[in-house]
Image: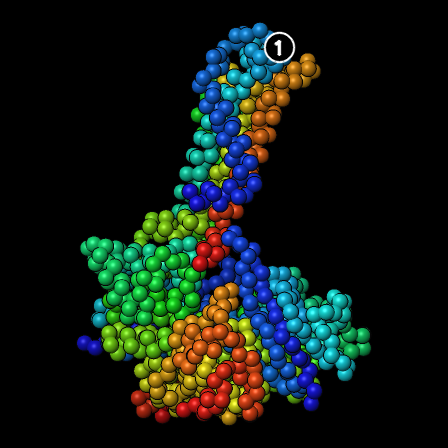
Amino acid sequence: MSLLLEVQNLTKVFTLGSIFSRLRLIAVDRVSFTIEKGEIFTLAGESGCGKTTTARMILGFEQPTLGVIRYRGKALEEFTDRKSWFREVQAVFQNPFETFNPLRRVESYFFGTVRNFKLAAQKKEAERLIEEKLRAVGLSLEEIRGKYPSEFAGGQLQRASIARALLTNPSLLVADEPVSMVDASLRMSIVNLFRKLCDEFGVSVLYITHDLATAYYVSNRIAVMFRGNIVEMGKVENVLVNPKHPYTRLLLESIPEPDPSKRREERVVLFEEREEYLRAGCKFAGRCPEAWELCGREMPPEVEVNGVFVRCHKWVK
Amino acid sequence: MEALRELFRDYRFAVGFVIFLFLVALAFLSFASPYDPIRQLQVPRDQPPSRAHILGTNSRGQDVFWQATFAIRNSLIIALIAGLVSRVVAILVGFVAGYRGGTLDRVLMGLADGLLVIPLFLILVMVAMLLRGSMTLVNTGLLLAFFGWAWDARAIRSQILSLREREFTKTCVLSGHGIMSLILREYLPFTAPLILSTLINNIAWAISMEIVLAILGLVRLEIPTLGTMLQWAITYQAMLLGQWWWISTPIVLTIFLLVALYWLSVSISEYLDPRMRIQRIGAQS
Amino acid sequence: MLPIIRTEEIQAFYVLETPRGKKIIKAVNGINVTIPETTIYGVAGESGCGKSTFLKVLLGNLEPPLRHFGGRVLYRVDGEYLDVLALPGTKQQKLRWTYISYIPQGSMSVFNPVAKLRATFLDFLKSHVPGKMRRELFHLAEERLARLGLSPRILDVYPHQLSGGMRQRVAIALAVLLNPRVILADEPTTALDVVAQRAVLQLLSDIQRELRNTVVLVTHDMGVHATVTTRMAIMYAGRIVEEGQTQDIFFTPLHPYTRYLIRSLPRIGDKRLRESAPGSPPSLAQLPLGCSFHPRCPFAFERCRQEVPELEEVGEQKVACFLKRASHVTTS
């Protein structure tokens, strides 16, 4: 089957506060999506929308309050130990200098991974495997040998991080803002790398970002999240070029485009952000220029419009 | 070693190291002592320093110099036992409480807090009074260890708590490492300076506490330690009688020892501080 | 129109003492720039190129380990040009906040962590402005906060109680409190969500238009430059490699680095392959000889390896490149 990852009704509720004032924060609210084999799927949204929490749950670093995560049909809980899960699913994080312990040599993580997952019997074999993965990202064992993280440039170190993640030959790579800390002039080479990994090696990528431009460039499908809900999901050409949900539209309008001829004159008015997480109805109702009274009361259902899923009352026929 | 050479550039380490080495040498010299450390009336009493007795003799008929060698040795033994045992406990408690969290953490920290809040001095005195007869070197060391782990356990725990949130913890887990491996590989380099400096501080503390206990007469006074030497000198009114060699020996030795330990502690923990180490790595390239 | 800020071969380096000797980081390595009045002037470049340091130098804020190694920074105040770095401390203080204002990267450093925000605002007003104007300016501040999506109740909290994005917006309101003639903004939108970013840029543009002052905006985000700036400079390894009208920089970049930069920007609606520049930027502590970009430049020749090119005019733009005549072509 070509379905790699299936997420159904995934929910995460955080309870904060003391005995006297408990606050329930619904960080991820009934999120459902699928990732196919050989596809790059983007989870996009601004900070606080729940995309990182979703990634953490998929990696097993956070327990879902509700919902199921299935990999090739098998539920996450059925994977007896973490290691068997990490053989299939690996991750790359935002800050390469935090990804590695500054007091340890970078290669120690490579050899450690090989040893722990029993990927090679002797040192020579291990070195060959590591060299292979490093070459796939444009580096070599020579280059990284003996060095500590602080001796690398950001772009290089992020590539090393990706190479480490590839060691177990995972089918799914969870990339959480992998290029937001990389310099603009080097960014595209790493983004192109993800494309290459997907096209040539069949590795699916769950790409998490707030940068819609790179999302458009690299992914096949995209889900836009707002305060824990997926508000729009579909092929990236549809969602980002013909946005249906008012929030997606607002996002797209607000991105500063690198094109001086397109200076926007419409103004945006900001509303207060508090309590949006706690809203009963559509979380965006407070800011939506097209909101009805119904929107504040009831959570809109997911509706399919031309192959795109939208969570908005306006699109309910 | 490269590290030692670097450390010696710091004057504090160099001086502290030399003094400490000298004192340790004195402690070892005790094995060559011609006199029994415990027996009294071995030599003529109250003699000022001379060629026969470099630091003179005391009112109990013992050679002050050779007594001092034993004193240093025994004080160091007590302090080392106290320091090492309390380190082990502090590390175990700190790591487990920090990484596991939850109820285990609360129980362990409750224990530690309890020990921190108890008026240490009173309890120490009470216990020492009860055990007076069996306050051997080892027992004194263990007693001090019992009270010395709580503070450092908390310090280690808070470091672990913050390290747990750092991204490389996730990378380590993703690389297939288990908890023990995680702690030893990732966290120990960060906690090492803390552990080492608290070890040295603990040793210094133990030495001082031993002196206090001795002055209160709560240890076996025939065993020469820095504290008991001082205690005897005070009891025999050495100062009033002008026997400066007897009373100043333990005082001067203690001061040197504590200063040396302090300087070692400060210079080593600065050297091992992760930020300094990262700077050194950067400077190499 | 006379320029309001002018720098002459300004150099400022960080001098670090490491266990292995002195390390000199040439963050601002000889910059000549003239910033016109009533513009939003952008300074673009990547992390580590020295642009934040450049802004600190423009402010006149040189604290060790940052040291002044040469050159001048001149501001036009009341018709004359003053060398900001040569001014005595008290005069510099007077200039700050009333004439020159600074929005730092990372908003926490602007606020007194143990005072409520209201106190910080009033404090500023008290030390710079006579009694009558205070009320007016305070109301103006509340109004601006509202335009940034923050209710006036925000003034009654402590800085640490706000999220990073909210703090950044308050920092901006504070920086423009006294309607300064020059606003130096260091990555003002980096910590913000896209929509908040838009509101902030809108506010900066509005203020610039109302007060007819100058904003020097440092950011690595080329989209921000395209949206708000009229003129911009591209910084690379401590020097300015290209300068001109924003339109020209985007549509006819001349310097090879700028061309790589512009060509690599992804755009929605366009899935064509985009390439980045090969290699990585040099460390400011170990700059290559000659032109700092030559190790990565596909057009480098002998002269590039030996001499450092100066900024020279090519049409309406200025480029620091020996190729300037040959590379006057449009991007694809």
Percent x, y for residue B257? 55, 30
Q: Which quadrant would the N terminus of chain C be assigned to in this image?
A: bottom right
Q: What kind of element bears circle 1?
A: loop
Name the residue located 50 percent from the left edge and 24 percent from the top edge.
B26
Q: Is residue B102 visible?
A: no
Q: Which quadrant would the C terminus of chain C be assigned to in this image?
A: bottom left
Q: Going by the image, does A97 lie left or right of C141?
A: left
Image vertical order of residue C87 relative to residue C328, above or below: above
Instruction: Identify the image quadrant of residue C176.
Output: bottom right
User: Which of the two residues, A262 or B10, is positioned nearer the viewer here?
Assistant: B10
Image vertical order of residue B73 relative to residue C303, above or below: above
Name the residue located 23 percent from the left edge and 54 percent from the top edge.
A123
- What's the chain of the residue with tag 1? B
The residue that disc 1 covers is B46
Callout 1, which amino acid? Asp
Name the residue located 45 percent from the left edge and 64 percent from the top edge.
A15
Name the residue located 78 percent from the left edge and 74 percent from the top edge.
C129
Q: Going by the image, does C303 lie left or right of A303?
A: right
Instruction: Identify the image quadrant of residue A181.
Output: bottom left
Label 1 crowd (10 A; few <14 / some 14-19 / many >=20) = many
